Amino acid sequence: MAYIIEKKQGKQIYLYQVESYWDKEKKQARQKRKYIGKKVEEQEQTQQANIKYEAKDYGQIYLIKQIAKEIGLDKILKEVFRDKCEEILEITYYEITEANPLYLYESWREATSLSDEKKERKQIENVIEELGNKKEQRYEFFQKWIGRNNKGQALVFDITSLSSYGKENALIEWGYNRDGEELPQCNLGVVYNEESLVPLYYKVYPGSIADVSTLKNTVSDLVMFGAKESLFILDRGFYSATNIEKMNQEKIEFLIPMPKTVASFDKLMKQSYGLQTSIDKLFSYKSEVLAYEKQKLQIGKVELEAHIYFNRKRKNEEELRFLRKLLDIEETIINKGFTKEQAVLDYLALDSQLSKYFTVNFSDTKLKLTRNNKEIEEHLGNKGIIILLASKPNLARESVLSLYRQKDYLEKIFDILKNEFDGKRLRCHSQASMEARLFIKFLALILYSALTKKMKISNMFKLYSIKEIFYELKKLRIISINSSQFYLSEISKKQKEIFSKLDIQIPSLLT
């Protein structure tokens, strides 16, 4: 492997090409150095044309390219989009490493080691517009991608709202906004594969469409793309008697957590009396000790299996958090010196979940704040408990819990679309532009998920965040001399460690 080093003598900086080799006689690593010339500062280059020195960011792009190749994403994009594949991938690399507005893409590309062909902002905007109108090609991509990655017994489905300023888009409507923003929106449903931990498919819906309708249409699309029959892992937002009836009618198998606020939760807890104290119901799951019981539950005309889990350690942690918050609120109210009952009620209303745990009275302008002990004890009684409802019978307790935990992990990745990738608000006015940007974000989400999986397997999150890895690898650069000789800057110990832990081949000399 060869690389460039700089050596300062006086006011001059000299460049040397260094190549490592193994000395068989001395049985040790040795180096050969070749003098290249002086490093010319930018302001001097007009006067000294003999050497043109240029350095471009490379390491983070190399990493993402290797992951795209590893999971077969680049191959499928090439098969589907052919001559536009390179531009689509480059925009995706920009999305995942920078997450900046598209108008900064041209400047980013000039500082990054990609193909030599110059691409102006207008060219990229044309690619985006063209991609947004290629619905058939996007569907072809989903078919190939699902065919490659649809493994395991379960699919995780999640949905979110994306606010938009667009005015010429039929999909942007007013509806329930999960982020509480006063903007019209579209709904985005994303399907993940539970085993491979990568996103398989997404679908955009008008902002007023209900959640179960989105799931029904998504299932139809997945069948069209050749996906196997699967169990859908859903979040609490899908729970209602009406939704459960509809999913049963559509023959959609599901696993869903039961909200603690519904009456059926308390009913099941009474039927499972003793779960929290019975030694016979304990089992070991990974490093945890849990209690478990299974009950039958009828919701409407649908019979479900309720998998009930109790975690004593989590119960203690949740109780402490709740009681600490309760006491903090109580102390704050007393110290604020309120003189009117309505003022206290308004303050408690800021956190509606806590307001029911206090009774407020004033006697001669003196505040009396009383704890509602019955409400507090009932709330504490449900801590550490989770109930998972399954439409599919005879699922193993470990399997049910594993599927649910996997959804928690994938939900964190889903949030990346809105936070890391600046996808919370769409600044696209036309539907074609919006479709293209969401497709690019989906590709970035695939690569981010694959990198997250590799980091999780190698326990790298204890050392780095993904952004930290990108920043560190960005220091690895490709250096060109007179636009003809290309060298890789010296790879640091930390960069070698990152590539090694991710099981990515360390980049070598480029020619």
Image (spheres, rainbow, N blue to C red):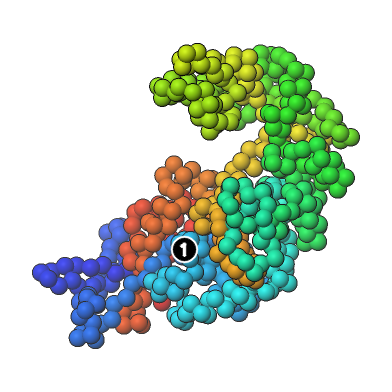
Write down the quadrant of residue 370 in the picture: top right
Write down the quadrant of residue 80 in the picture: bottom right
Quadrant of the rendering where the C terminus is positioned:
bottom left
Q: Residue at x 73, y 48 (%)?
A: 211
Q: Residue at x 43, y 20 (%)?
A: 334
> On the image, numbered disc 1 is attached to which residue?
100
Q: Nearer the viewer, residue 14 or 324?
A: 324
**How packed is label 1: few (under 14 Cα within 10 Å), some, or many (20 or more)?**
some
Say above or below: 460 vs 38: above
Image position of 488 (left or right of 128): left
Residue 192 location (% of width, % of height): 67, 51
Q: Is residue 227 visible?
A: no
Residue type at tag 1: Asn
Quadrant of the rendering where the N terminus is positioned:
bottom left
Q: Residue at x 23, y 82 (%)?
A: 45
Q: Is residue 216 visible?
A: yes
